[in-house]
Image (tube, coloured by chain):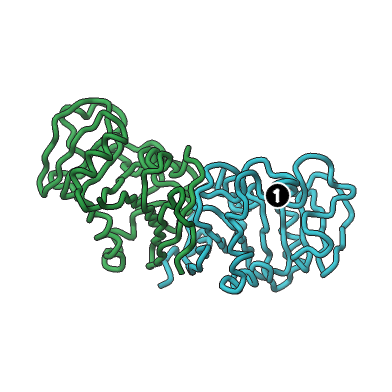
Chain colours: A green, B cyan
Amino acid sequence: MGKVTCDMAISVDGFVAGPNQGPDAPFGEGVGDSLHRWMFDEPEANAAELTEMTAAGAFIMGRNMFGPSRGDWDLDWTGWWGAEPPYHGPVFVLTHHERTPLTMEGGTTFHFVTGGITEALERAQTAAGDWNVAIAGGAATVNQFLAAGLVDELRLHTAPVLLGRGERLFEGIGRTDLRQVDVRRTGLVTHLRYAVVRDGASPTATA
Amino acid sequence: MGKVTCDMAISVDGFVAGPNQGPDAPFGEGVGDSLHRWMFDEPEANAAELTEMTAAGAFIMGRNMFGPSRGDWDLDWTGWWGAEPPYHGPVFVLTHHERTPLTMEGGTTFHFVTGGITEALERAQTAAGDWNVAIAGGAATVNQFLAAGLVDELRLHTAPVLLGRGERLFEGIGRTDLRQVDVRRTGLVTHLRYAVVRDGASPTATA
């Protein structure tokens, strides 16, 4: 079985989106491209991280990451990403509404999971086999997985901005020891990689 | 005139202290040595940053950093640091209570400022001359200076832990663009250095 990973583009003050996300502001108000500029303006400098983000065998995302918060997307909404989403594999969407799987171009299939994070993880791990399962967001979903102790590796892509408001990662989670794995800075972002230390494992740092 | 700098030991989830700081738990409950272990266990590996933290010409700190939150320290409290505090220079303490300056061993003098952050900064800059002024904490004081746009350089010393609760840096501040200056990882901490981008200045990254 692979690892459970989580990549998040995040501000220095811990926000992963602005307030009031919606069709007109998919990353929330006041965010603009500040958190994701490194992806678009520096793809070559950040190629290693970008490749790794999408190399999972299956993905899990929250309901609000799949569709806008208002209205009912269950019947005809096909996600934010157009005909060919960037996942190229199975994506398990947490929701309260049953829906038949939705197959997109390029190998992405959205599966709708009504049994919560445990069911989503079981199904994703079965689908991923030896590959990693990536928790794709948003903040509330990542926080749920962190609080449950289900994330193995946290990869923060920290953009040099203080947003001041919005959706904060790391709300409602308990104390968790991490181990530093790697850090790398490019022109527009700092990539910080941490392993979650399990009970009984040593929090000793790697040099 | 030097820069206004701010060094903070901080968790990955943005806490600089646990809840209920007091004489029995100066860093707050549940924190232990998790945020500061790199200072005590790895002083040689982190010598550059430790030296720089204390190299300012003057320091500013909040009332709660100087003394415990409960009770009246104004008359006989001399700080947490014993006879010879580690500042070795003038320290301007924000307070609502007048008090004559308190001279300690080793060159530290605590000055008590009742005129808020603007008066504290003016007096500290006058005392520091060409040297930097360091905002020494705690979180509420740093947040006040950040919100007022008075910090030039933010140096986060990020320990590999999620604390989950406590005193959070970056509360109540507005959007602020930063520029990445440096990042360095040792065994127990990652040092992240940011310059605050002023209005009119270019947020272009340094390579």
Q: Secondary structure at mark 1?
A: loop
A156 displayed left or right of A119: right
Q: Is residue B95 left or right of residue A183?
A: right
Image coordinates of residue B187 in percent, x first then y, are 50, 67
Q: Which residue is mark 1?
A: B26
Left or right, A88 with reference to B143: left
**Residue A185 location (% of width, % of height):** 40, 67
Front-most of B164 and B119?
B164
Quadrant, the C terminus of chain B: bottom left
Q: Is residue A29 visible?
A: no
Q: Quadrant of the N terminus of chain B?
A: bottom right
Residue A27 lies, in percent from the top left, at 34, 44
User: Which residue appears at 32% of the width and 51% of the height?
Assistant: A5
Give the side of residue B59 with respect to residue A36, left or right: right
Residue found at x 64% / y 44%? B29
Percent x, y for residue A65? 29, 39
Q: Nearer the viewer, residue B62 or B25?
A: B25
Q: Residue furthest front?
A: A200
The amino acid marked with disc number 1 is Pro
Q: Quadrant of residue B55?
A: bottom right
